[in-house]
Amino acid sequence: MDEKEIDRLAERFIDKTLPKEEWTHEAHLTVAAWHLKQYDFYEALCFMRSGIISYNLSVGGTNTSSKGYHETMTVFWMKLIDSFIRLNKERSLLDTCNKFLSSGLAKRDAPFHFYQRETILSTEARSLYIEPDKISVNERTVSHSLESKIFSSL
């Protein structure tokens, strides 16, 4: 994937023309990184929140207490990617996406390194942001996780 393809992915997500089967875990993370490179953290988070909720509806999905949008997961991934970007400020969007996606941080089960399973999978966590109950998400913990290759065992 090159930068134009990343831009196009973000555009298709924003305008709701991205086919549902292309809205993969990696696409979520790439679009999050795109937003974080374009906007400050809180503006990017706002765009991702509203974007995911409306995208889900546009492809026939729902946003309920058991399916669809998940507030804690969204904020978690945004904080994780933002910390990675802050540690790698000099990287281009393309390099940021490639490095992040190839790191263990991008694994689907990375949230369980920071959260107890029952916490992040709760109904409450789906609707309201809950802080990690194992390890905080910040530049220090992200850097440590990368250096110690903690995620290689997940």
Image (spheres, grey):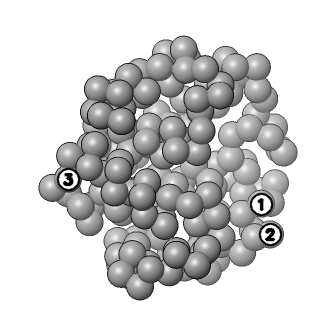
Q: Secondary structure at mark 2?
A: helix
Q: Crowding near pointer 3: few (<14 within 10 Å), some, many (20+)?
A: few
Please tell me whether residue 27 is drawn above or below residue 72 in the rendered image. Answer: above
Residue 65, x across and y down, in percent: 83, 44
Q: Who is closer to the viewer here, 91 or 53? A: 91
Q: Quadrant of residue 16?
A: top right
Q: Position of residue 79 (x, y in %)?
A: 45, 58
Residue 18 visible, this angle:
yes
Residue bearing mark 2:
118
Looking at the image, the residue that sits furthest to the bottom is: 148
Check disc 3 and report its element: helix, strand or loop: loop
In this picture, is 134 found above or below 127?
below
Task: Determine which residue is flagged by label 3.
Answer: 91
Q: Position of residue 44 (x, y in %)?
A: 40, 40
Three-letter residue code for mark 3 = Arg
Q: What whole-number distance in Å separates the C-alpha atoms at marks 3 and 2?
A: 36 Å
* Residue kind at label 1, given as amino acid type: Leu
